[in-house]
Image (cartoon, helix red, strand yellow):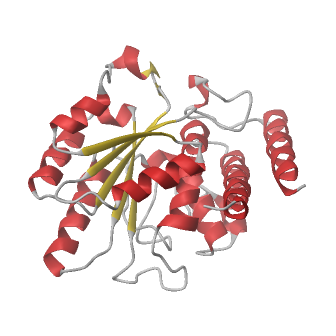
C-alpha cells in the first residue's frame, strides 16, 4: 500500500466516524462505541478489500459482509453511503419510523446489506451458510463476518466455528472487534474471553491478530488470510471502543447511548479537526 492509498483510507475512516456520530445523534439512540471501534476495518473492507459494486449490490459473484454485531450498524451505514450505495443524508433518518436505515441491518430494505442481523451469534452462522453455498455452487467469492468480543460469549458462535472448520470454509474470514468492553462492562469481568486466539485455533481456524486501527496491519493480515487453504480464518482485531472521540474512548457507558447537543458538537469538532489535519 502506497502513502496516497493509506492517506485516503485514513480520511475515509474519519468520514465514516463523522457520519456514525451524525446518525446516532439524529436518532437520539444507538451504539456509537462499537461502531467507532470497527470503523477502520469496515473502511478497509469496503474501500480496498472486497469485490463489490454499489451499482449492482446483488451481484451473485460479489464478496459478502455480515455484521454479526448488528447493533453497530451506524458505521456500516456510513461506509455503505460513502461507497455509493445510497445518499449520505439518508443516515440522518437512522432509526426513524418509516426510514430505510433501521437500528439493525435489514437485507430486505437497505442496499448493500447482505444479511439481516442483530441477535448476537446468528450473523456468523449465516456467514458460514454463505461460504458453504459458494463452495457448493463453485463460486469464488469470499465472506467476511465481523463479531463483537462480547458476542463471542454466545454458544452459537462456537457451533458456527465447528461448522466452518468441519466444512473447510477457507473462503470465510471471521473478524473479532476486540475492544474489551460490552454493555455490562469489561468483557473479561462479564464472562471471560481469556486465550481467545487459542480457542479459535482449537476449533480449527487459522488465527491472526492485528491492530484494528492500523491500515498497514489490516492489509497485511487480510492478504495472509487469502493464502489460507482448507480451513477458515479468524482475525482478532485489537481496537479501542469509541475510537476517534476523546470522551468516548474506552468508556463502557458509550456502548449504547447517543450524545446530547454539546457532546455531539465536541465529537464533530474533534473528528473534523482530524480530517482537516489529514487533508492539509
**Nearer-the-camera pick, 44 or 271:** 44
In the image, taking residue 49 as reference, residue 36 lies left or right, namely: right
Q: Residue farthest to the right?
A: 280
User: Eyeballing the image, is 267 above or below 182?
Assistant: below
How many numbered markers are drawn? 0
- Does residue 81 appear to the left or right of 265 in the view shown? left
Which of the 4 image quarters holds residue 196?
top left
Observer able to see residue 159: yes
Q: Quadrant of the C terminus?
A: bottom right
* The quarter of the displayed image where residue 140 is located: bottom left
- The image position of residue 154, as x and y in percent, is 26, 35
State which quarter of the image contains the N terminus: bottom right
> Which residue appears at 25% of the width and 46% of the height?
206
* Residue drawn at (58%, 52%) of the image: 75
What residue do we see at 41% from left, 46% from top?
69
Query: Residue 259: percent from the left, percent from the top?
Result: 72, 36
Q: Quadrant of residue 117?
A: bottom left
Furthest residue in direction top, as rendered: 189
Give residue 175's position: percent from left, percent from top.
39, 47
Q: Is residue 117 visible?
A: no
Left or right: 277, with 7 as reference point: right
In the displayed structure, would residue 80 be above or below residue 19?
Answer: below
- Residue 147 is situated, as x and y percent measured from the top left of the image, at 38, 44
- What residue occupies the far front of the structure in this picture? 2
Compared across the picture, whether 25 is left or right of 169 comes to right
Nearest to the observer: residue 28 or residue 129: 129
Amino acid at each position: 500500500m502506497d502513502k496516497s492509498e493509506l492517506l485516503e483510507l485514513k480520511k475515509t475512516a474519519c468520514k465514516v466516524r463523522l457520519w456514525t456520530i451524525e446518525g446516532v445523534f439524529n436518532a437520539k439512540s444507538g451504539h456509537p462505541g462499537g461502531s467507532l471501534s470497527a470503523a477502520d476495518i469496515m473502511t478497509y473492507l469496503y474501500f480496498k478489500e472486497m469485490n463489490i459494486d454499489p451499482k449492482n449490490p446483488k451481484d451473485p459473484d460479489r464478496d459478502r459482509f455480515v455484521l454479526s454485531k448488528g447493533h453497530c450498524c451506524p458505521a456500516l451505514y456510513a461506509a455503505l453511503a460513502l461507497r455509493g450505495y445510497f445518499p449520505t443524508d439518508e443516515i440522518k433518518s437512522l432509526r426513524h419510523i418509516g426510514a430505510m436505515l433501521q437500528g439493525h441491518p435489514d437485507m430486505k430494505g437497505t442496499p448493500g446489506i447482505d444479511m439481516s442481523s442483530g441477535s448476537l451469534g446468528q450473523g456468523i452462522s449465516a456467514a458460514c451458510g454463505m461460504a458453504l453455498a459458494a463452495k457448493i455452487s463453485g463460486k469464488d467469492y469470499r465472506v467476511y463476518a465481523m463479531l463483537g468480543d462480547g458476542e463471542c460469549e454466545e454458544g452459537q458462535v462456537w457451533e458456527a466455528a465447528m461448522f466452518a472448520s468441519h466444512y473447510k470454509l477457507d473462503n470465510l474470514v471471521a473478524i473479532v472487534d476486540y475492544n474489551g468492553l460490552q454493555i455490562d462492562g469489561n468483557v473479561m469481568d462479564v464472562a471471560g474471553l481469556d486465550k481467545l486466539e487459542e480457542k479459535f485455533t482449537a476449533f480449527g481456524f487459522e488465527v491472526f491478530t492485528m491492530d484494528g486501527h492500523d491500515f498497514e496491519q489490516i492489509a497485511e493480515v487480510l492478504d495472509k488470510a487469502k493464502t489460507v487453504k482448507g480451513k477458515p480464518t479468524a482475525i482478532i482485531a485489537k481496537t479501542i471502543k469509541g475510537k476517534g472521540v476523546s470522551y468516548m474512548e474506552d468508556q463502557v457507558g458509550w456502548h449504547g447511548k447517543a450524545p446530547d447537543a454539546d457532546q455531539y458538537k465536541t465529537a464533530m469538532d474533534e473528528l473534523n479537526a482530524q480530517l482537516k489535519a489529514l487533508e492539509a
